[in-house]
Image (cartoon, rainbow, N blue to C red):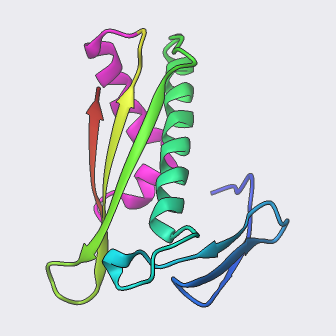
Amino acid sequence: MKVLYTTQATSTGGRTGHSKTADGTLDLDLVTPKELGGSGGKGTNPEQLFACGYSACFLGAMKYAAGQEKLKISDDTSVTATVGIGPRDDGKGFGIDVELAIEIPDLDRATAESLVQKAHVVCPYSHATKGNIDVRLKVV
């Protein structure tokens, strides 16, 4: 693979700690959610960051796939990623669960569903999670 872009972030303190990108663009506190035994409160967590990254990347993949198909998708198109975390069925750690809710206002359902499937092949997050995470795609 020819790498076109790299970035770097450093975290300290684990799930209740701090993360910062090398260029300083992101510099944020991490807080463990109450549901996972933490205090909750002000800060973010890895699941929120993953949801932001996956939803943005998937929308980018949809735009790419639409361009390949000579389709125009509305600026109001959105992807909402719902990311859950819990113990794996094998009892050996934790896993994540993802649902992507995709809204493409100006396309008929069949065209939208076809585009979503093509984006799921193109998206690097989808590729990285394939076979490892249950990712459900829902055209709304």
- Dominant secondary-structure state across the stretch colored magenta: helix
Residue depicted at 69% across the width and 55% down the height: 2
Residue 122 magenta: yes
Give residue 13's position: percent from left, percent from top. Answer: 60, 90
How many numbered marks, from 0 up? 0
Q: Could you tell me which quadrant the N terminus lies in? A: bottom right
Q: Is residue 77 left or right of residue 90?
A: right
Residue 9 drawn at (x, y percent) = 71, 73
- Depicted 114 relative to depicted 81: above or below: above
User: Farthest residue toward the right?
Assistant: 23
Q: Is residue 75 above or below residue 23?
A: above
Q: Identify which residue is drawn at 48% across, 44% down.
A: 55
Q: Nearer the viewer, residue 132 or 34?
A: 34
From this viewpoint, which residue is outermost toward the left?
Answer: 89
The answer to which image quadrant residue 138 occupies is top left
Quadrant including the C terminus: top left
Q: Is residue 5 magenta?
A: no
User: Is 13 displayed left or right of 124 in the figure?
Assistant: right
| Residue 135 locus on image (x, y percent) | 29, 51
Give me the residue at 81% from left, 71% from top: 22
**Is 24 situated above or below 89?**
above
- Examine the image and state in which quarter residue 24 appears: bottom right
Identified at 56% across, 28% down, the residue is 64
Where does the magenta region start and end? 107-132
